[in-house]
Amino acid sequence: MQRALIVGATSGIGKETALQLLQKGWILGLAGRREENLKELQQLAPDRIHIRAIDICQEDATDRLLELIEEMGGMDLYLHCSGIGHQNYQLAPEIELRTLETNGTGFVRMVTAAFRYFAQQKRGHLAVISSIAGTKGLGAAPAYSATKRFQNTYIDALEQLARIQKLPIRFTDIRPGFVATGLLNDGKHYPMLMHTEKVARHIVCALEKKKRIVVIDWRYRILVALWRLIPPFLWKRMTVRNYPPPVLLSPQSVANGGTHR
């Protein structure tokens, strides 16, 4: 049976993707900060779900990751669902720096550990959930949009590195738009809102087909294409207010793994 390790699986997109992979017969390694949530998931299939409390912002995260891989008997797929995002019009340093630490340092810490494991194994599939926010710099969420662009570029670099080293590692960069989670339950109207179940179905399909870059869904593919056509002098004059950066997750998710999802 195939084995998938999901970091950031305690709620939101990560949790729903885990449930759908479970239905398809996968052996799962699930990680996040909230161990009680992981234990609840493990009860669904104790023989096929292995768990580990991991904070990706802590230096011991990679050691705990390798422990989980060993416990689940190996890893075919690594799916990184952890991250945080906030609107930050006032540029509060604690928000910007925490976002950078989680979406930058924590991200690199985990995906490089997965890359090294797959390099030693001589095969593997490394997938990350980034965001359409990496397309352009969003004034409402500078650190979030910048770190998502960083993630897009980092995966590009790892793919090239794998080719240089002649390693058969596949890569998937998943870029959702607005997703209905607890953080968006504030009475405001959000455009083109998607439910986690639908997003997870798209993710599982992309993983099974080993797609390289996936924008979820078709409406956001059109939006991203339009964003790319907007020249810098016009983009800086655009005002987008009262919307969080896509993808944002529930408050519980933000607590997961220094992390979201």
Image (cartoon, rainbow, N blue to C red):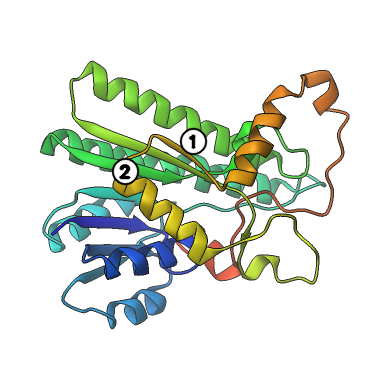
Given residues 243 and 21, the one toward you in this image is 21
Picture layout, residue 13 above or below residue 202? below
Question: Residue, x 33% and y 26% (percent of image)?
Answer: 159
Given residues 172 and 192, the one toward you in this image is 192
Question: Residue, x 53% and y 32% (percent of image)?
Answer: 150
Amino acid type, mark 1: Gln
Task: Return the mark for residue 151.
Answer: 1
Q: Position of residue 130 (x, y in %)?
A: 51, 43
| Of the two numbered discs 2 and 1 in the rendering, the one whose residue sits closer to the viewer | 2
Task: Return the mark for residue 93.
Answer: none
Number of residues whose C-alpha sits closer than 10 Å to that of mark 2, classed few (under 14), some (14–19) or many (20 or more): few
**Circle 2 residue:** 209
Left or right placement of residue 260 versus residue 92 in this view: left
Looking at the rendered structure, the secondary structure element under dot 2 is: helix
Which quadrant holds residue 69? bottom left
State how far apart marks 2 and 1 are (Cα): 21 Å
Left or right placement of residue 143 versus residue 190 in this view: left
Residue 59 visible, this orientation:
no
Picture layout, residue 83 above or below residue 249? above
Question: Residue, x 62% and y 56% (percent of image)?
Answer: 248
Amino acid type, mark 2: Lys
Residue 15 visible, this orientation:
yes
Left or right placement of residue 227 versus residue 247 in this view: right
Q: Position of residue 228 (x, y in %)?
A: 68, 26
Q: Earlier in the sequence, mark 2 or mark 1?
A: 1
Number of residues whose C-alpha sits closer than 10 Å to that of mark 1, classed few (under 14), some (14–19) or many (20 or more): many
Given residues 225 and 133, the one toward you in this image is 225
> How many numbered circles does the render carry?
2
Looking at the rendered structure, the secondary structure element under dot 1 is: helix
Left or right placement of residue 144 versus residue 36 in this view: right
Quadrant in which the N terminus is drawn: bottom left
